[in-house]
Amino acid sequence: MPAGSNAKRERQYEHIKESQQERGTSESRAEEIAARTVNKERARSGESRTASKTSTQDKKSAYQRGGEHSHEGAQGPTKDQLYAEARKKNIDGRSSMNKEQLRKALGR
């Protein structure tokens, strides 16, 4: 747990760490994610002595951001995610499209 934290941050750290481990993340990676998240929240709320500019000026907290950046890796969203979006937009022929065709039909 990061130095200088209070009981609330300790609970927050443990909760994040356990949540990450339940998702299958290794213990060391779960500890890193939890520490980074708690440190950023401490910086945002003025509980730390030093803080980066992005930690204090970011409009959204880590919790508000949620899964915003999920599936933005090398392959992007899954075919199922693209299909669901195409269904919402009522794109014709979506059931016979492959991933690349869905991406083009959605304008991605």
Image: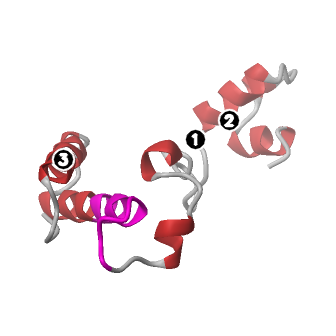
| Residue 42: image location, x then y, percent | 32, 62
Q: Give the range drawn in magenta.
A: 36-49
Identify residue type, mark 1: Thr
Among the two numbered marks 2 and 3 on one chain, the one whose residue lies closer to the N terminus: 3
Query: Which residue lies under the disc numbered 2?
Result: 82
Q: Give me the residue at 29% from left, 71% from top.
A: 48
| Residue 6: image location, x then y, percent | 15, 56
Marks 2 and 1 close (CB-CB < 8 Å)? yes
What is the spatial separation of the Cα atoms under label 1 and label 3, in whole angstroms? 37 Å
Query: Which residue lies under the disc numbered 1?
Result: 78
Q: In this view, does 99 lie to the left or right of 105?
A: left
> Is residue 47 within the magenta segment?
yes
| Residue 45: image location, x then y, percent | 38, 59
What is the spatial separation of the Cα atoms under label 2 and label 3, in whole angstroms? 39 Å
**Label 1 CA crowd tier, 10 Å (few <14, some 14–19, many 20+):** few
Dominant SS in magenta: helix
Q: Give me the residue at 82% from left, 39% from top.
A: 106
Query: Which residue lies under the disc numbered 3?
Result: 8
What is the spatial separation of the Cα atoms under label 2 and label 1, in whole angstroms? 6 Å
Residue 71 shows in the view: yes
The kind of secondary structure element at disc 2 is helix
| Residue 52: image location, x then y, percent | 45, 78
Among the two numbered marks 1 and 3 on one chain, the one whose residue lies closer to the N terminus: 3
Task: Report which quarter residue 105 is drawn in.
Answer: top right
Q: In this view, does 93 lie above or below 41?
A: above
> Is residue 8 within the magenta segment?
no
Q: Is residue 82 left or right of residue 2?
A: right
Question: So how many labels did they put on this image?
Answer: 3
